[in-house]
Image (cartoon, helix red, strand yellow):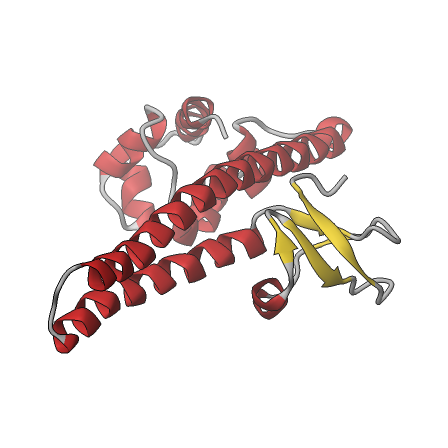
Amino acid sequence: MDQVKIGKFIAERRKAEGLTQMQLAEKLNITDRAVSKWETGKSLPDSSIMLDLCDVLKISVNDLLTGEVITVDNYNKEIESKLVEMVKEKEENDRRLLALEWVIGILSCIILFVPIFIGALLPLEEWQRILIVFSGFIPGIIGLCFAMRIEQVAGYYKCKHCAHKYVPTYKAITFAPHFGRTRHLRCPECGKKSWQKKVISKD
């Protein structure tokens, strides 16, 4: 969303309704400083007052979020454009998450195994050895569980048999045999098991 464009649109609609920033703020029970931030593109209206703002400015929520009055002719095009934008944004976020997964996974393995090597190599008493091992075991396992959660929600898995793309359950991801991001999963669409690759797009 273009915050600057939306801000200018709010200012135009406010002036068209003959309201000052203070008067608009009073109608919404907020400060005129908040209205000023909207109109300069520094922030967006909170979702809790968005409907009230639209009522005051005599516009729809869709008008507000696009920064212009949407006519019937271009309404469908705007919706399609927003959907495409949302899909692209999700794909980009998924790529970032999957990159983060590698970092978390590597760090978790280091945290998990380094204390084990230290405990095995250094001449320590038994209680000290156990304490060192557990100091790395708990945070290491937590980190790996978090990485697995990213593996589950970011992107999709594609069935080799029917090409169905889906997000598996956390349990399925955790217990499935795998090589990297290719896992042996059961497809919820055709019910067959296969080695399925992680993909970003659902198209």
Identify the residue at horizontal 64%, vertical 61% (top origin): 177
What number of labels is visible? 0
Judge by depth and name the residue closer to the eye, 176 or 99.
176
> Where is residue 130 shown, x and y percent of the image?
21, 73
Which picture quadrant has residue 87?
A: top right
Image quadrant for the C terminus? Answer: top right
Identify the residue at horizontal 33%, vertical 60% (top origin): 140
Judge by depth and name the residue closer to the eye, 20 or 199.
199
Identify the residue at horizontal 32%, vertical 58% (top origin): 112
The image shows residue 75, relative to residue 169, as above or below, that is above
Lateral position of residue 76 relative to residue 178, left or right: right
Judge by depth and name the residue closer to the eye, 27 or 68.
68
The image shows residue 52, relative to residue 140, as above or below, that is above
Q: From where the camera sits, is residue 86 visible?
A: yes
Identify the residue at horizontal 75%, vertical 34% (top origin): 76
Lateral position of residue 124 relative to residue 118, left or right: left
